Image (cartoon, coloured by chain):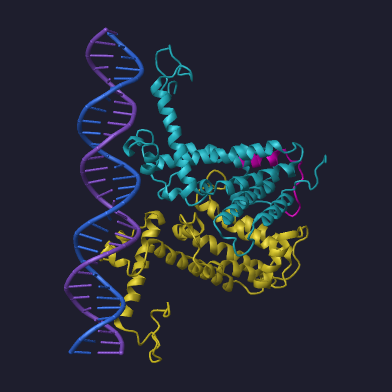
Chain colours: A yellow, B cyan, C blue, D purple
Amino acid sequence: MLSSVRTAPIRGRLPPMAATRTARQRAREELTLEIKEEARRQLAADGAQKLSLRAVARELGMVSSALYRYFPSRDDLLTALIIDAYDALGERAEAAVAAAPPGDARARWRALCHAVRDWALAHPHEYALVYGTPVPGYRAPQATVEPAARVALAMAAVLRDAPAGGRPGARVPEGELAGQLSALAAQLAPGVDPALLARGLAAWTQLFGMVSFELFGHLVGSADPAGPFFAHTVEEAADLLGLPDSPPAP
Amino acid sequence: MLSSVRTAPIRGRLPPMAATRTARQRAREELTLEIKEEARRQLAADGAQKLSLRAVARELGMVSSALYRYFPSRDDLLTALIIDAYDALGERAEAAVAAAPPGDARARWRALCHAVRDWALAHPHEYALVYGTPVPGYRAPQATVEPAARVALAMAAVLRDAPAGGRPGARVPEGELAGQLSALAAQLAPGVDPALLARGLAAWTQLFGMVSFELFGHLVGSADPAGPFFAHTVEEAADLLGLPDSPPAP
DNA sequence: CACAGACGAGAGCACTGCTCTTGACAGCCT
DNA sequence: AGGCTGTCAAGAGCAGTGCTCTCGTCTGTG
């Protein structure tokens, strides 16, 4: 396996720039996009379960076997859609945080949480693809971990930039958890109190727990239009995270 | 609806007791159980996605079409498994609560939470079937709602029997949420403070959010052996719910 | 220009859920 | 006791799936 990268030419001449790419390359990229587009359409319509390579190919006017030139298997197509979904959600969350008043940590937190829920409600099947049951065998491809972390990173940034203080009554993490938290803090939110970080993790799991419960129908008997409950709990979580209650500049 | 049950004959003679059921009925019941058993085995091995009616039939030494006499469709088989899973989890949770010291609300809460997680870890695919992505079309059959509520009911009972007090700093639910909570309280935990009930709902979603995140691999980068984080968060949730910190009778 | 590689098309394999028909048997009523 | 009725397992078959392999064709490149 001396030439592992197949597309990279040995000659130093041509960097495959956007302008100098050949017609084949352009066609390939466009077709790849079209395939993902159609697949996403079917995903949104019927869910990941019913996404069929043959149906995608049919809709695109090509034969099913030709599609395997672009995605070696159905799982690879799904993986591509997963990455796109993570990126779309992450981008939305980051944009919401960026649009909130920079000094108002609570507003930033609130914007983040509601952005996640809004995106999930708008793209239920894509959300389910990403935060629902993993596909049968499942091995998270390395390519997914970075986009998957975007929401968590945005949350960490909100906490990092929030005025210190925290909420009293937080238990101090001990033992193995303390180690995990300090390692985590070192890599994404240096200087954050471990107890606060533990609450951040908890709020993170709760955020997606609420959204999943709402989307998957587990709240129908209780908090049925889940909006008010969601908003309330987001505020309570903000309280727990010690985010100041009133904006500094109204 | 005096004679809603179909199997009850109009003649007064034979009540279909366990002893007096015909050979056909017995065979049918046994085969139904065997089918579910084998299906559950395949579910545990490969996940709901790969559960195949033909494979189940093959393993049972019968032909696939015969299986449709017992379950009219694959979805119906899955629904039966869903109900069983709900029941198994609910029973486990109830048993854990019952085994905890009756007066120690925190111990009961802790037992409930850990029972849920332990069951989920022991039966990941059954958990995913129930709390993961709902099946494609999905309409929750009425038969599932009662077993589905068992864990929530057990949680409500723990809160109801806990010494009143709650934790200061709870936001009072307003508007639509207040109405939902009072309706909810009326039917499963009368006399519970709405603010506390809101926190109970939040804890409920968080519990399953944590378990789902752990099972579906979303915690690998952060709280990797998730046990310590789970235990910590369960205690913090108990704090929030105002459950007394130390057992009254050690 | 010639050639290696990429490409689309088609046939085909093994599998799925599900339907329909057929023949055998059990349970019930007279 | 005998006949009717409904249940049952079995088999064939349909439409659909993911995926593989082979075949000519065209394209970009040396």
Q: Nearer the viewer, residue A158 or B213?
A: B213
Q: Residue at x 60, y 71 (%)?
A: A100
Residue B239 is a magenta residue: no
Q: Quadrant of residue A192?
A: bottom right
Tell me which segment is drawn in magenta.
Answer: B152-169
Residue found at the far front of this picture: A1
Q: Is residue B246 left or right of residue A158?
A: right
From this viewpoint, which residue is outermost toward the bottom?
A: A13
Count every numbered label the image shows and give the total. Answer: 0
Give the quadrant of the C terminus of chain B: top right
Image coords of residue A33 (percent x, y): 36, 71
Q: Is residue B51 above or below residue D4?
A: below
The image position of residue B139, as x and y in percent, is 43, 44
Q: Return the residue nearer the eye: B15 or A115.
A: B15
Look at the picture and state if A46 lies above or below A70: above
Query: Residue A171: which quarter of the image?
Result: bottom right
Residue B6 seen in the figure: no
Tell whether position B158 is magenta.
yes
Q: Quadrant of residue B247?
A: top right
Residue at the image position 42 percent from the left and 77 percent from the top: A1
Depth check, front residue: B143 or B15: B15
The quadrant the N terminus of chain B occupies is: top left
**Whether residue A53 can be seen here:** yes
Left or right, A86 with reference to B162: left
Locate residue B93 relative to residue A48 in the image: left or right: right
